[in-house]
Image (cartoon, rainbow, N blue to C red):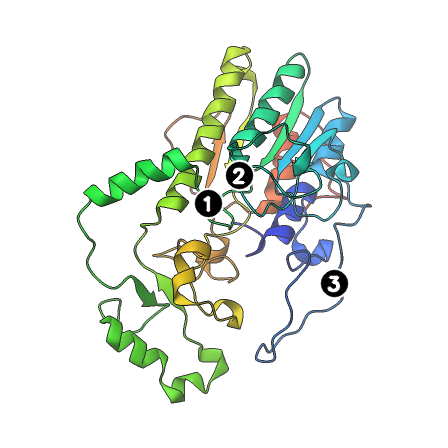
Amino acid sequence: YATCHVCSPSRASILTGKYPARTNLTEWLGGRPERDYEPLHHGEKLTALPDEEVTLAETLKEHGYATANYGKAHLRKDPKTYGFDEAITGWVRSYYYPFSGEYSKTLPAKKGDYYTDKLTDAALDFIERNKDRPFFVHMEHFAVHDPIQGRKDLVEKYRKKLAAMPEQDGPDFILESNPDGPALKEEELKALAENDELQAHQDARVWWVKQKQDNVEFAGMLEATDESLARIRAKLKELGLEKNTIIVFTADNGGMSASNQYRGINHPRKSLDSRFASSSLPLRGAKGWNYEGGIRVPLVVHWPGKTKPNTTSHAVVTGTDYYPTLLEMLGLPTLPEQHV
């Protein structure tokens, strides 16, 4: 489980070993405006992860590890402040060159280059240069965050695949936790959504959820991310490091929501497939909600000689667990005064 349903607090938990309430980061940095209909309001808002936090990267660096951070980050300061020797991070407005963001602009790239691929190139270069010493790569791919923009060759692959698939039954969108089930016709859903009595209660707002996972751009983004991990594993094998490297794959929050009333902000129906391209069905909610769909995330741990391939653990894990667990896995002393 992620410790929060949005990015910054969850990412801070992974690096500090603390819950959002302890770091005082309980909303994505930059934040969203408060809404009149929300019964709870924010307290004091921080502008960045506090410098006094001793991050996982700082601790590993103290023990001789080379450290690097690539991707989104979203803690509002230069990642080198938090213990990373090298970093190329930031928010991008397009996955195609030229990339926006102060640090992302430093990526060696040319017209037609795709952001996920170039971040991976940077990580591979770092691994190559540090192959003779311990290293920690914190790879925080911006994908699959909006803008929903897949790599063109992969988008075409999935467009052809989708065209060859039989059309799915049922409406494209259903109502979140609809008590009548997802079989309602579009006209019936629309009538329910426009019910004056329902709309009068702000705590009973209507949420549309994408039922059909058929966005070819999103699929292309996802496969590019899979390719990135495959390339990193291939590099480790090439360097003879695959048996001495731990890989942890997870996410900072649940899947992208498909609601056209996300947090009360109305989006045109046509924008649902470009900005909100997916959903967390059958889990309730998605990114931005404290339901399972917003905080339940994938977790894969590859520890050669220790974890058994193709097995599933039913242990409950959350974002605060990575810091102390990784230290123990590496045979390093834990820091109970810092992490949980």
**Residue 204 seen in the current view:** yes
The relative height of residue 175 versus residue 21 in the rendered view (above or below) is below
- For the residues labelled 3 and 1, the Cα–Cα distance comes to 31 Å
**34 vs 86: above or below:** below
Q: Amino acid at mark 3?
A: Lys
Question: Under tag 2, what secondary structure?
Answer: loop
Q: Tell me the amino acid under the disc marked 2.
A: Tyr
- Mark nearer the N terminus (2 vs 3): 3
Marks 1 & 2, CB-CB < 8 Å contact: yes
Binning the other alpha carbons within 10 Å of mark 1 as few (below 14), some (14 to 19) or many (20 upward) gives many
Of 337 and 168, which appears nearest the observer? 168
Which one is nearer the viewer's eye here, 215 or 62? 215
Q: Residue at x 75, y 32 (%)?
A: 59
Q: Which residue is mark 2?
A: 96
- Looking at the picture, does residue 135 appear above or below residue 101? above
Name the residue: 70% across, 28% down.
67
The numbered disc on residue 45 is 3
| 336 vs 192: above or below | above
Tell me the CA gap for discs 2 and 3.
Answer: 33 Å
**Looking at numbered disc 1 in the image, what kind of residue is underneath it?**
Gln
Observer-side mark, 2 or 3, equals 2
Q: Position of residue 4 (x, y in %)?
A: 58, 55
Farthest left residue? 166
Mark in the foreground, 1 or 2: 2
314 relative position to 186: left or right: right
Circles 2, 3 touching at the beta carbon (< 8 Å): no
Outermost residue toward the front in this view: 111
- The residue labelled by disc 1 is 149
